[in-house]
Image (spheres, rainbow, N blue to C red):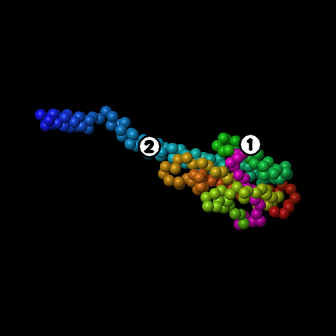
Amino acid sequence: MFDRIRNKIIARVQRSVRCFARRQEGAAAVEFAFIAAPFLALMFAILETGLVFFAGQTLENAVSDSARLIMTGQAQTAGWSQDDYKTQVCQNFLSVGLFDCANGVYINVKTYASFSAVNNSAPVTNGVFDTTKMSYSPGGPGCIVAVTFYYQWPIYVTYFGDNLTNLNGGNRLLVATSVFRNEPYGAAGTC
């Protein structure tokens, strides 16, 4: 008697399993559940990569446009300090809302004796950005000047490795530089 009941139960379970295996109604939902997480991670990684490149290009445009204030002597004749120059940059060139300009953008302006002497290496030591190495020396007429903007962009999607990060803490250091010779806006001085 127990064998007959057990056989009926086994037969009923086997029929249910075969019936479940043949059904197709939820196949699309199950298949999407398998690929949803990698698909969404890939989409967010693509969006973030695009945003990083857009932010880098915005920073490049800002340094190119704002460097003209130094190249034409406007910053020097107005007697701007580093904070004054940064205020002009934030108000006129980086007001798009991508950056925390007041607290996150670092500006380095240095004067050099020749174009070959320009050092454009980022002040990064062991994956840490050193903000103490920023200076402001816009030079006079005819001087060679390098204007560099730095911004630590946070990277959120690191599913596929840390390919976008170049600093500790999951950040990417965006760097934009413009090197030029100041125009002769006044009497030549020492550089």
Q: Is 9 rendered above or below residue 137?
A: above
Q: Amino acid at mark 2?
A: Ala
Image quarter (top left, top right, bottom left or bottom right) of the C terminus: bottom right
- Residue 167's x, y, as percent? 60, 55
Q: Quadrant of residue 88?
A: top right
Q: Quadrant of residue 102?
A: top right
- Residue 152, position in %: x, y? 64, 51
Q: Which mark is residue 167?
A: none
Total marks shown come to 2
Horizontal relation, residue 123 to residue 112: left or right: left
| Residue 111 colored in magenta in the image | yes
Q: What is the span of residues highlighted in magenta in the rendered image? A: 101-116
Callout 1: 10 Å neighbours few (<14), some, many (20+)?
few
In this rendered view, identify the residue nearer to me: 147 or 82. Answer: 82
Q: Do the residues bearing badges 2 and 1 touch, measured as CB atoms within 8 Å? A: no
Q: Residue at x 68, y 48 (%)?
A: 104
Residue at the (14%, 35%) spot, across then down = 2
Amino acid under disc 1: Gln
If you read the primary sequence from the N terminus, does the residue marked by circle 2 or circle 1 appear first?
A: 2
Q: Nearer the viewer, residue 83 or 1?
A: 1
Q: Give x and y (percent) for residue 27.
A: 33, 37
Q: Quadrant of residue 129?
A: bottom right
Residue 91: assigned label: 1
Does residue 22 appear in the picture of this structure? no
Q: Tell whether position 67 is magenta.
A: no
For residue 27, above or below residue 179: above
Above or below residue 18? Residue 146 is below
The answer to whether one can see residue 189 in this image is: yes
Q: Relative to residue 143, is residue 106 drawn left or right?
A: left
Mark 2 lies on a secondary structure that is helix
Q: Which residue is mark 2?
A: 37
